[in-house]
Amino acid sequence: PELMLRREVLVMDGKVLRQQLAASELAPGSFYVDAAARTITLSPPGGKDPAHAVCEVATRSIALHLAGRKNVILRGLVFRHDASLHAAPLCAPLQISSCNNVVVEDCQFSANNNKGIYLGGSQNHNITIRNSRFNGNGCIGLNAANCTNLLIEGCETNLNNWRGNWAGVYRRWPCGLKVSRSNRVTIRIHRSIRNMATGGWIDLENRDVRVEDSIFYGNYRGLHLEAGEGPYLVQRCQIAANRQEPLINEWRWSFGSGLVLTHARGVMLKNNLIFDNDVAQVGVRDDRDKHVFRDPVSGVIHEWYTERVSLKNNTIIATDANPTLLRLPSKDFDGGRFWQQFRASDNNYFGMRHAKAFVIGAGAGLGEACSAGQSGLGSCNGSYTFDEWRNASGQDAGAHFNDGDVADLSPPDGLVT
């Protein structure tokens, strides 16, 4: 959509105003750019007089670009109101390309047109991003690609994708945090909250990824692991209250779920708290059996499947409004590859004991059930109670199910509102 591709930003008294594509669509708190006439028409927010307000129009793109640099520390800087384009490589006020040993610490990235920061180039090595905030940007807060030894620690990516929200675009590009084509990645003590898109997206050709002690709350999908060799370790995280997007052009159950796996190999989910997510708390997509990717540089073709997945000692909580605990493929999906090495043990579930909270055959409707005389995965797709799930899957022998209403769950401590 055109709104995603535009780069004009107008700010009044610190607030980003909404861009309209026609003068007839102007409403209080918005503006329109007539490129042919080289004019901007402003409709100020109610009660605001532009003559007595601070009005800013973004004109500059890429405030700082580190290219091929070594041993650099950026500390205490603020990057705001950047007018960069939608697509890489010209897409953020701070760009780091083909660098080695760089630290970004105690910095702020907010109200930028597209991304807060972009790491790209041929390959970055030994990058640390610590105690920095990437909040309220137009599309993505923090976007890292082509990194080896990447540490993201104590950071925030909150309230991003306002431009996508204007255009009704919540998939494909937008998210709070995105990591691609990177090796040895650690994301620790991270907060990704109320992004109008996916909270955290570990997407495409990532290896050796750890996500720990982090919160993914109130996004349009919590944490998505997609298309990579892995291994992935997600531990001690809180993934909660992630919702279905408001405009559903193509319904997919994975949007609005808590933690979603798509063609991710070698996944361990351990000691996490996952609760009150729309559609499913944990789910595996099954709309296609594999992801095929040709590396644009080497030409090597990769094929990824969702396999070697383990859930251990997680607390997974359903509510009356969002009753599904696990949503997994049928046993015959992808020739049974997923189920051959799927393991679930020692998990702690909360919900109504007789609710059909375990959905097998991710594409199956929540109300579907086995016909009389049918049992076991692969003989039917449908929804199962906890006891039926354990009998049919052979998993979760050491698990516990806590029967009762848990509708009054509170947000994690210290969560922004």
Image: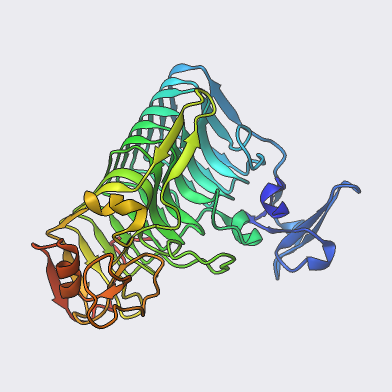
Q: Quadrant of residue 179?
A: top left
Task: Measuring from the top left, give residue 115's x and y in whole percent.
Answer: 56, 43
Q: Residue at x 49, y 51 (%)?
A: 175
* Whether residue 77 is visible: no
Quadrant of the image containing the C terminus: bottom left
345 or 213, nearer to the observer: 345
> Does residue 187 show up?
yes
Location of residue 65 (image quadrant):
top right
Q: Position of residue 347 (x, y in %)?
A: 16, 61
Q: How is the image coloured?
A: rainbow
Identify whether 225 is placed above or below 333. Answer: above
Q: Residue furthest right?
A: 37
Q: Position of residue 280 (x, y in %)?
A: 35, 67
Quick one: quadrant of the N terminus? bottom right
Q: Residue furthest front?
A: 373
Residue at the spot 58% in from the left edge and 68% down from the top edge: 247
Residue at the left extreme? 398
Q: Which corner quadrant of the image does residue 403 belong to?
A: bottom left
